[in-house]
Amino acid sequence: MSFSIIQHMANHNVFLGLSNGGLGTLANRNYDIINGDTITLAVNNNISGWNRWNESSSSFNPTSYSNTTGTGYGTSPAVVFTATTNGSYTMNVYSYRSSSQGGYAYKTGRVYGQITGAAASYSLSAPTSIQEGTTGTVNISATNHTAGTVYWSVTPTADFSPNTGSTYVASTGLGSFSLSPITDNTTEGNETATIRLYSNSLRTIQIASTTTTITDQAAAGGGGGSTGGGTSGGSTNQGIDVFSPNGTKVFGTDLRTQNVQYEQSVSISGSSTSSTFSMADANDSTKVLITLLGYYPPSRFTINTTSTGFSITNNTSGTKTANLLALRIG
């Protein structure tokens, strides 16, 4: 989830009453606005029986407009103009009727003021989770931004090193920084971390935030080496035999005591199932333990078992790697 400070564009409803020489309060309206704001302009040209008026300004879209609708000597339907250029502006509005069109009349008015740049907005995008002892990248995206330094912090502070920092956001509006949860070798469960972005080094002006999950490494478990010195899985031809002082085998691949059957990395294509690993009693949890080492979302893999073996299904759309460990425990 990400959070950003965004300034939404505003609309300004403006009524303009034209007059001789553009005099009077209704013929001169002052509005200071932000680039991207809109002015919804309604005009009364104050010429009896005449509904035409024209507008021009290079600071708005459209840059010019000619109205031919509405009733004579009345307010025309409103027209929307969008501010596009920073700086001072003037929307010049006039209505002209010639003598041959019903008697000479010329009325003017204006809307004027300052257009300032839109406020910068920022958003953060972080990994869904970051495991203790690893590093995750947090991306920054900014709009209406001037290139410069921003400042970040993350809580709980005791779970990260470092837990504050700064980074440069280029004129493209893109930047990033890294987070590294500390490995504390304590089983405490997963935690939620909050990442905050600030515009000042005192970190009093927050401009964006997001969250990520710290995955507890102790709870997730660790990996291990390959069985029998090879890269392929263990089998009844690989493993360790342990004998008692009188020569009786008490631990071995051919005994139903605790021993490694498979320990290897398995790469599985998206929405596919691995080849079958042969293993007697694979579906009997009192005799066999089949697990995937490390942290995986519960929905990512499915372990399929039968009385003679097992396979692993990748439930995602992309190729994933699973760290497999299969033990005989009884």
Image (spheres, rainbow, N blue to C red):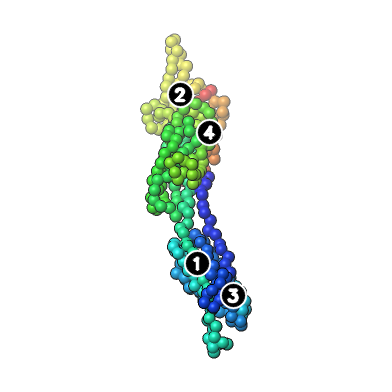
**Which label sits on residue 190?**
4
What residue do we see at 49% from left, 46% from top? 207
Q: Position of residue 294 (x, y in %)?
A: 47, 33
Residue linked to disc 1: 112
Decide: few, some or many residues near mark 1? Use Cα within 10 Å; few <14, some 14-19, many ≥20.
some
Q: Is residue 27 above or below residue 320?
A: below
Q: Position of residue 7 (x, y in %)?
A: 52, 54
What residue do we see at 41% from left, 52% from top? 146
Instruction: Work out how far the residue at label 3 is from the one at label 1, CA to CA, in angstroms.
Output: 17 Å
Look at the image and tell me whether residue 258 can be seen: yes
Query: CB of mark 4 within 8 Å of CB of mark 2?
Result: no
Name the outermost residue toward the bottom: 100
Which mark lies nearer to you, 1 or 2?
Answer: 1
Instruction: Work out how far the residue at label 4 is from the one at label 2, CA to CA, in angstroms.
Output: 36 Å
Residue linked to disc 2: 253
Q: Secondary structure at mark 4?
A: loop
Q: Earlier in the sequence, mark 2 or mark 3?
A: 3
Q: Secondary structure at mark 1?
A: strand
Q: Earlier in the sequence, mark 1 or mark 2?
A: 1
Residue linked to disc 3: 44
Name the outermost residue toward the front: 24
Q: Position of residue 31 (x, y in %)?
A: 52, 63
Q: Earlier in the sequence, mark 4 or mark 3?
A: 3
Amino acid type, callout 4? Asn
Instruction: Work out how far the residue at label 2 is from the one at label 3, CA to CA, in angstroms.
Output: 96 Å
What residue do we see at 44% from left, 15% from top? 243
Q: Nearer the viewer, residue 180 or 330?
A: 180
Q: Position of residue 211 (x, y in %)?
A: 51, 41
Amino acid type, callout 1? Tyr
In the rendered structure, the answer to whether residue 28 lies left or right of residue 201 reads right
Quadrant for residue 40, please give it.
bottom right
